[in-house]
Image: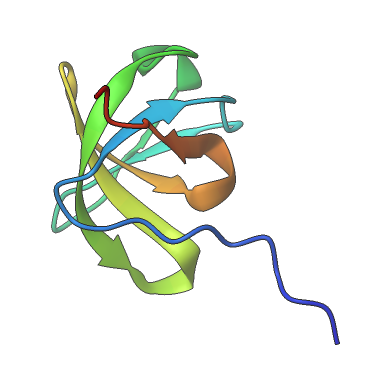
Amino acid sequence: MTHAMSKEFTVGEKVRVVALPPYVKTAEPMPMLRPPEVISIGEEGVVMDRRPGGYWGVRFTKGAFLLDSQYIEAIAPTP
């Protein structure tokens, strides 16, 4: 059995959007679906928490959203 392509992040880690999902879920007690244009490729955010189903709560300038790990990558800290 092959290992799923689920990337792991740590809370507080900076991440960058590498692809846009078909829609974006807000990271609220009652999540709402938003069009993907609320975030853009290359936008940076901070991981807030891990959610069920491989989702990560990420805080961006325009708000906090739930993103699957395939849409984000860790930003390597600059030395």
Q: Nearer the viewer, residue 48 or 38?
A: 48
68 in relation to 71, above or below: below
Q: Nearer the viewer, residue 69 or 2?
A: 2
Q: Please, which residue is most extreme toward the bottom here?
A: 1
- Residue 52 horizontal side relative to residue 21, left or right: left
**Residue 74 position in % (x across, y down):** 40, 38
21 in relation to 70, above or below: above
- Residue 74 horizontal side relative to residue 79, left or right: right
**Residue 60 position in % (x across, y down):** 20, 25
- Residue 16 horizontal side relative to residue 12, left or right: right
60 in relation to 7, above or below: above
At x 50%, y 50%, the residue is 69
The colour scheme applied to this rendered structure is rainbow
**Residue 31 position in % (x across, y down):** 26, 50
Q: Which image quarter is the N terminus in? A: bottom right
Q: Quadrant of residue 49?
A: bottom left
9 in relation to 70, above or below: below
- Residue 15 horizontal side relative to residue 1, left or right: left
Q: Please, which residue is most extreme toward the right here?
A: 1
At x 26%, y 58%, the residue is 10
At x 32%, y 66%, the residue is 51
Q: Which image quarter is the C terminus in? A: top left
At x 54%, y 37%, the residue is 71
Could you tell me how many numbered marks the image carries? 0
**Residue 50 position in % (x across, y down):** 29, 64
